[in-house]
Amino acid sequence: MKYYGKSKEVCDNIINIFQSGNLPEKLAPIFVNRNDNIPSASWSWMNKMVMFVVGNTNDARTFKQWNNVGRKVVKGAKSFTILGPCIKSVPKENDDGETEYIKILYGFKGISVFKIEDTEIYDPEKWEKHAEVDIKAENNLKNLPLREVAEKWELKISSYNGKNSNTLGYYRHGKEIALGVENLSVYTHELIHAADDRLGTLVKQNGQVESNEVVAEFGGNVLLKILGYEKDVDLGGAWEYIKKYVGDDDTKTIKRVSKLINRICACVNLVLEESNVIIDEIENTA
């Protein structure tokens, strides 16, 4: 196996840092806080996940909502369903013996929504007036390093409001990388997952798998070091993350990482091979 950018050497150096115990402080997560003026911005996290995973989109609305902003659903488009709360007012006697009405949730109903990709503009003036997308968040996604690799693999790159989630990011098999934080280490973690998947070495089963997470976390930081993003390398966070899966024993963790070095390097190499980065420049920074 060939190691572009001295990836094996970088891996060994990181392991030496782990063994020495001289780890840098863990980077604080910078949560994405999208300010899109769209209906889904106020949806529950569960409905947002349905939109990302089932709808494969970042913007979904009802038939009427699309019409109201100058777009119409194209013929033959299929909707998907989110859950809407069922609320009613019921009488309740207060401390003064007076009757007042309070709202209670008594169930949920299905709501059919359509993704923006299945709509078209019929009123350009109205759409321009209402199309308020978080430009800053979109620009951050456009400026991600190695974005061309994700695009070559036909992966959508999206972001979501990380403050309302219990995840920092996720990779959806062959379809999407979604980010809830602006940290590059989270992005490269998910990109390494995608490389692992393309190489056929990603273990596919429900839930998070130890080897997958070790490869992604370690490999993502190797990739950042090779590319020269020293400020974004999160070795302290990586060590904590990996130990969470392997166990609290330092020696056991080092051995587990060492056994996965070839798989880690293969993932890093694949990303670099698919990128527009000049290999000679990488070797000078390793």
Image: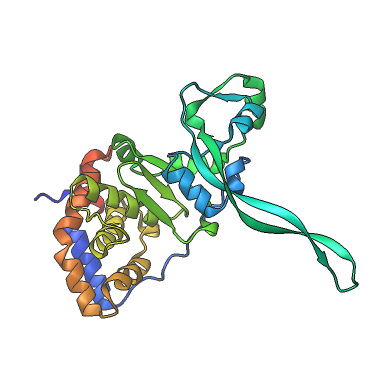
* Residue 160 seen in render: no
Q: Position of residue 68 (x, y in %)?
A: 66, 29
Position of 236 relative to 3 (above/below) = below
Image quadrant in which the C terminus is located: bottom left
- The answer to which of 2 and 173 lies nearer the viewer is 173
| Side of 162 relative to 233 (left or right) | right
- The answer to which of 269 and 112 lies nearer the viewer is 112
- The answer to which of 17 and 153 lies nearer the viewer is 153
Residue at 86%, 74% (x, y): give it. 95
| Side of 242 relative to 140 (left or right) | left
Residue at 39%, 57% (x, y): give it. 232
Q: Position of residue 282 (x, y in %)?
A: 24, 47
Residue at 14%, 66% (x, y): give it. 259
Q: Specify the quadrant of the image occupied by residue 7.
A: bottom left
Q: Position of residue 73 (x, y in %)?
A: 54, 25
Residue at 44%, 50% (x, y): give it. 179
Position of 71 relative to 152 (above/below) = above
| Side of 66 relative to 102 (left or right) | left
* Residue 232 seen in render: yes
| Side of 77 relative to 61 (left or right) | left
For the image shown, how many numbered marks are present on the structure?
A: 0
Position of 254 relative to 69 (above/below) = below
Q: Which residue of the protein is positioned furthest toward the left in this rendering?
A: 1
